[in-house]
């Protein structure tokens, strides 16, 4: 569900003229989240400076979540991100950053015709391949 408001949302303030991009759309997206206990509808809010019809804004929101879900799935499968038990201080953010850097390095290396997980394993097994990944 996409609510397209031109008048804004309660508590959302229009920026004053000359202070950056002007708010053109406020979007309320009702996302269906499926935790183990059952489906729950959660509202998500977006703002945009793009003056576009509701259908185009809907496509932008769906595209964002498609990319986000794809990256999360890759990080989870390749690096077992969901099983990581680091919870203290800056550890979770530091490891997430290292995983994303590793993912990008492995994705950009194309001498092996295997997936990201296969490249990660090869980098652990072969020092010459690890150097090839790290040095680009």
Image (cartoon, rainbow, N blue to C red):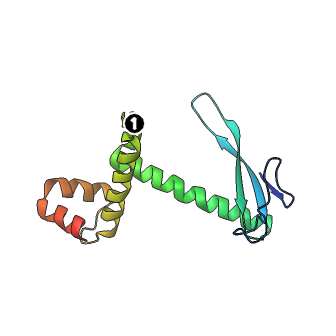
| Residue 126, placed above or below residue 90 | below
The x and y percentages for residue 58 are 72, 61
- The part of the image, by quadrant, that contains residue 93 is top left
Horizontal side, residue 4 vs residue 104: left or right:
right
The x and y percentages for residue 51 are 78, 71
Q: Residues within 10 Å of mark 1 (few under 14, many from 20)?
A: few
Q: Residue at x 61, y 62 (%)?
A: 63
Q: Residue at x 20, y 58 (%)?
A: 123
Q: Quadrant of the C terminus?
A: bottom left
- Secondary structure under tag 1 reads loop
Give 78 or 102, whichever is nearer the viewer.
102
Considering every residue shown, the one lying at the far left of the view is 127
Give 45 or 112, whichever is nearer the viewer.
45
Q: Residue at x 66, y 59 (%)?
A: 61
Q: Residue at x 18, y 53 (%)?
A: 124
Residue marked by disc 1: 89
């Amino acid at each position: 569900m996409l609510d397209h408001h031109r008048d804004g949302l309660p508590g959302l303030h229009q920026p004053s003229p000359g202070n950056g991009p002007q708010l053109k759309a406020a979007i309320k997206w009702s996302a269906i989240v499926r935790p183990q206990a059952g489906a729950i509808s959660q509202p998500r809010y977006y703002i945009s400076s793009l003056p576009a019809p509701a259908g185009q804004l809907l496509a932008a929101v769906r595209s964002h979540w498609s990319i986000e879900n794809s990256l999360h799935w890759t990080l989870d499968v390749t690096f077992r991100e969901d099983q990581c038990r680091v919870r203290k201080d800056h550890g979770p953010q530091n490891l997430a950053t290292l995983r994303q850097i590793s993912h990008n390095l492995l994705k950009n290396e194309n001498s092996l015709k295997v997936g990201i997980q296969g490249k990660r394993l090869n980098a652990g097994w072969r020092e010459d391949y690890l150097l090839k990944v790290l040095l680009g």
